[in-house]
Image (cartoon, rainbow, N blue to C red):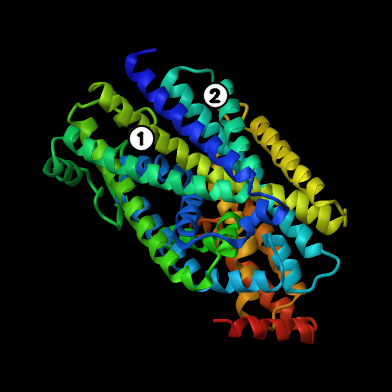
Amino acid sequence: MTAAQICIMIVMVLYLALMIIIGAVYSKKTNNVGDFYLGGRKLGPLVAAMSAEASDMSSYLLMGLPGLAYLSGIADVGWTTIGLAAGTYLNWLIVAKRLRNYSSHCGAITIPEFFSNRYREKKNILMAIAAVVIIVFFVPYTASGFAACGKLFGTLFGVDYHIAMIVSAIIIVGYTSLGGFNAASTTDLIQSIIMTVALVIVLVFGITQAGGWDAVITNAKSLDGYLSLFTTHNPETGTGSPYKFITIVSTVAWGLGYFGMPHILLRFMAIENPDKIKTSRRIASVWVVISMSIAILIGVVGIAAVNNGSFAPLADSETIIISLSTLLSEKGVIWALVAGVILAGILASTMSTSDSQLLAASSSVSENILGGLFKIKLSQKAEMIVARVVLIVISVIGVVIAWDPNSSVFGIVSFAWAGFGAAFGPVMLLALFWKRSNKYGAIAGMVAGGVMVFVWKYVIAGLADVLNVYELLPAFIIGLVVNVIVSLATPKPEEDIVKEFEEVKTIK
């Protein structure tokens, strides 16, 4: 192992140790499942904002966006960023405060429990379906995070992929199972700061390696279609091709996913003071726009650095930040330590999503299926033990799914995003803002939206070019329409449900 690798390893080990310490600290403050899964609704505005966005972005921010910009220019990443930024802002503006108040009013600490309590669904069918949706999409989603950690350590240090993945999983499970939601949220705040520092350092260093900002722009202009939002660059042919309107709509539709993301919606439910949500919204929106813009610029800078010979063309475009960090680490001990911070940022982006997903999946099994559906009553101590055991079991399943280093586990991320957005998004919006919606519509809409994600992707999308859109968009629309039609075609909700809806609506 080289001196640079040792420096990088030291920084990353210190970072991982800090995460475990935070988990241990919060373990003493976690007394019941309400604390474990929702932190006792005590999140401040800064932690709420940054933990929500850190758990949202995952490694897509530091690997996916720069890699896509590096390959094809700004059209794909530009419209994706517009959709995600709009979705982030609207989610905080429309959903956050109403969900915080409504979930507190009906005593819900998980998303499935909120749906069930909102509609007084006594048989807990809606809760069970929602819990199954979370498990189906989150377990492989979590596996992709474990795989990312394994590949990162394997690439950097030549460590066996399986060993690196297992160690990473143990650390994530360790601080999450110890401190629960508060530990995950606090570490997410730290991880968002590290991610931001990493992005800024890489951008500045990349510009120097590319020969300055003018050289970056000159290179981008020389690539046909690279700097346009309406054309995309083909790196194989060197030519640009039109970015179709249907593709733009499909790409922007990524923003719809936010209305159904359990790990983000849980942050809204956990906010201590609803009056501070405006502050959280501003922090979250500004951070998302700036961080995604910098990530895109890193891809643009990276292709310029490659074209001027600073380093060899990349076999995998998503390793652009890793490549720049490795180059930086060769400049001396201090810079190697800085490179360690950057690479810890990639690790942070993955861990911040995995811990939140683990909590959401764990709560679905222990709270919603065992407690809600099967009515298994446990003591407070036993509930905490079950919560932690379930979290560990889910993690083991995630490790098994990610065991093959060449598996396409990363492909599940966009599919899982579509699944949550279509299954939960319409139900959440109608539950919060339409008093005529009922449990029948919610169940039908959730099933229709979730099923349509599979049907559209694997059956309909391939039938014609015009139908080849991101499955979230049509599935979201179907889920919304089915929910409305079934609600109108079945009995009105009971008087006490409508009364509660009106009471929540008046809360300022």
Amino acid at circle 1: Ile
Q: Quadrant of the N terminus?
A: top left
Q: Estimate the spatial distance between the alpha carbons at disc 1 and disc 2, rounded to whole Å.
A: 18 Å
Which residue is tagged 1?
A: 342
Is residue 93 visible in this depiction of the protein?
Answer: no
Q: Is disc 2 placed on a helix, strand or loop?
A: helix
Which residue is tagged 2?
A: 164
| Circle nearer the N terminus (1, 2) | 2
Q: Residue at x 44, y 45 (%)?
A: 190
Specify whether 235 is left or right of 372: left
Q: Position of residue 440 (x, y in %)?
A: 77, 73
Q: Residue at x 46, y 39 (%)?
A: 348
* Front-most of residues 457 and 105: 105
Specify whether 246 is left or right of 299: right
Residue 427 to residue 468: above or below: below
* Front-most of residues 303 and 337: 337
Q: Quadrant of residue 146?
A: top right
Q: Position of residue 183 (x, y in %)?
A: 57, 46
Q: Position of residue 275 (x, y in %)?
A: 49, 73
Q: Quadrant of the C terminus?
A: bottom right
Tag 1 and tag 2, C-beta contact below 8 Å: no
